[in-house]
């Protein structure tokens, strides 16, 4: 059955008075804007219609989700299988790989493909599907990747949203060989293993910030907090750092970090520790200081309700990091919590600077690499924000 055929679609009637919902062309249509539903209950695709039957928007349908429809088209533009394929191929075509052989091929709303993320690691593609409608048209995604010459497709099925959507949480692979790749990024090499790793296996979004680190590291003592597989550490060492320390709470991540440093012929130290305790302990011992500290923690705010608690976490970690900088030292600090605004993050870092007794200025505002575009129509997709801060001598 053609999942895009008009007769296999769900039909969602817009609630009178909710016309505003589609005026801004935001792709998420919530259950609260829908008066009633009819047609195929197992549909992958649904049309949002007005009381006269005019199609207002079409997209992927998700019965279990509050986001009932992820719109791909609005008004006159017909949603067909060809259009969906063309969207995927257009996203692929927008990417350039001048920095190496890894990058984000599809960035959800940023590529007008709400709920779909595809990262490419050499000939291994890692796919994250966040909703049921997309899951049902998976074959089209597979087809597009195969046409692009991908060897192995790894479905990373651990997104919390999948549980709500009653989708399988077990990863799957399609294709030949092991689900691992060695990528090259700006001449440096990293092993990526999506199974069991964070996100799709590597933080492609930090590519430009890693390059920046490389350029700032010469002769400096660098501390890489929340080092994961050591990518910032490798860049600092390759950039001529006097010394690099990597700290992560996960022993497995630290093992990978050691491997990645060895792969590039660079040296560093590695500590399995809670970053908060590590900083506090070092501060009270008064032994170590650094010239550049990278602080890239996991998202402390997983939901809107976590924002206050997360803010205290960010304040604490940034306060201690600032205290441990040598005079004139720099802090590269990030938050990847989508629920915490850039504005609030700036206030938190300001408050940490105030309490640390250090004067400091922004040297740069930092964001995700350009293969992670954010839709102007769904700005909440902008999760990563960071500051490069320099303290006074
Ligand atoms: N900066 C990394 C990505 C960080 S991902 C990069 O560019 O590749 C977040 C990392 O923080 C994970 O590796 C996780 O193990 C680690 N982590 C989570 N909580 C931590 C804590 N309290 N102390 C130290 N590391 C922690």
Image (spheres, grey):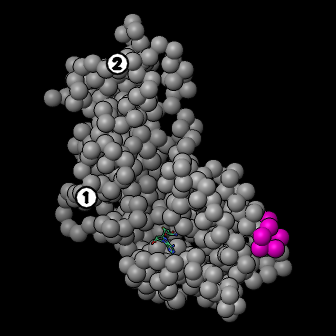
The reply, left or right, for residue 216 in relation to residue 309 is right
Task: Give the quarter of the figure containing the N terminus.
Answer: top left
6 vs 161: above or below: above
88 vs 46: above or below: below
Give the crowd class for mark 1: few <14, some 14-19, many >=20 residues within 10 Å.
some
In front here: 320 or 43? Answer: 320
Q: Write the start and end of the magenta stretch as one range.
A: 354-363
Could you say which disc has been placed on residue 2 in the image?
none
Picture coordinates of residue 282 (x, y %)?
64, 87
Does residue 230 show up? no
Picture coordinates of residue 181 (x, y %)?
33, 69
Counting residues from the start of the chain, the first of labels 1 and 2 encountered is 2
Residue occupied by mark 1: 171
Q: Secondary structure at mark 1?
A: loop
Picture coordinates of residue 137 (x, y %)?
25, 38
Taking the spot 51% from the left edge, 27% from the top edge, the residue there is 25
Could you say which disc has been placed on residue 36 in the image?
2
Can residue 360 be found in the magenta stretch? yes
Q: CA distance from mark 1 to mark 2?
A: 34 Å
358 vs 271: above or below: above
Task: Give the quarter of the figure containing the C terminus.
Answer: bottom right
Can residue 183 be found in the magenta stretch? no
The reply, left or right, for residue 381 in relation to residue 392 is left
Q: Secondary structure at mark 2?
A: strand
Q: Is mark 2 within 8 Å of ligand 1?
A: no
User: In this figure, what is the number of numbered marks?
Assistant: 2
């Amino acid at each position: 059955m053609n999942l895009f055929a008009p007769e296999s679609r769900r039909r969602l009637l817009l609630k009178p008075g909710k016309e505003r919902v589609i005026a801004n062309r935001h792709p998420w249509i919530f259950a609260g804007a829908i008066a009633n539903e009819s047609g195929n209950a197992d549909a992958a695709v649904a049309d949002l219609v007005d009381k006269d039957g005019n199609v207002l928007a079409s997209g992927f349908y998700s019965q279990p989700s509050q986001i009932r429809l992820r719109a791909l088209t609005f008004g006159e533009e017909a949603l067909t299988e060809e259009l969906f394929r063309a969207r995927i191929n257009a996203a692929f075509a927008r990417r350039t790989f001048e920095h190496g052989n890894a990058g984000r091929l599809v960035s959800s709303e940023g590529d007008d493909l709400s709920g779909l993320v595809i990262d490419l690691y050499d000939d291994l593609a890692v796919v994250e599907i966040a909703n049921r409608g997309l899951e049902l048209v998976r074959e089209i995604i597979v087809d597009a990747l195969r046409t692009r010459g991908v060897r192995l497709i790894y479905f990373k099925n651990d997104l919390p949203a999948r549980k709500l959507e009653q989708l399988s949480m077990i990863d799957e692979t399609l294709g030949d060989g092991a689900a691992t790749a060695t990528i090259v990024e700006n001449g440096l090499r990293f092993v990526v293993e999506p199974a069991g790793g964070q996100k799709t296996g590597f933080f492609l979004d930090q590519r430009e910030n890693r390059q920046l680190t490389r350029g700032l590291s010469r002769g400096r003592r660098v501390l890489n907090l929340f080092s994961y597989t050591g990518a910032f550490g490798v860049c600092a060492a390759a950039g001529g750092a006097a010394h690099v320390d990597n700290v992560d709470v996960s022993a497995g991540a630290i093992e990978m970090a050691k491997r990645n440093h060895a792969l590039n012929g660079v040296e560093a130290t590695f500590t399995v520790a809670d970053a908060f305790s590590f900083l506090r302990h070092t501060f009270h011992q008064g032994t170590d200081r650094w010239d550049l500290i990278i602080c890239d923690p996991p998202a402390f705010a997983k939901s809107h309700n976590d924002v206050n608690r997360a803010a205290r976490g960010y304040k604490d970690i940034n306060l201690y990091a600032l205290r441990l900088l040598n005079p004139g030292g720099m802090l590269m600090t990030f938050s990847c919590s989508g629920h915490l605004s850039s504005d609030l993050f700036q206030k938190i870092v300001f408050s940490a600077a105030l309490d640390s007794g250090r004067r400091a200025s922004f040297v740069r505002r930092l964001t995700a690499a350009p293969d992670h575009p954010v839709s102007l129509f769904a700005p909440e997709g902008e999760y990563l924000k960071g500051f490069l801060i320099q303290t006074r001598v």
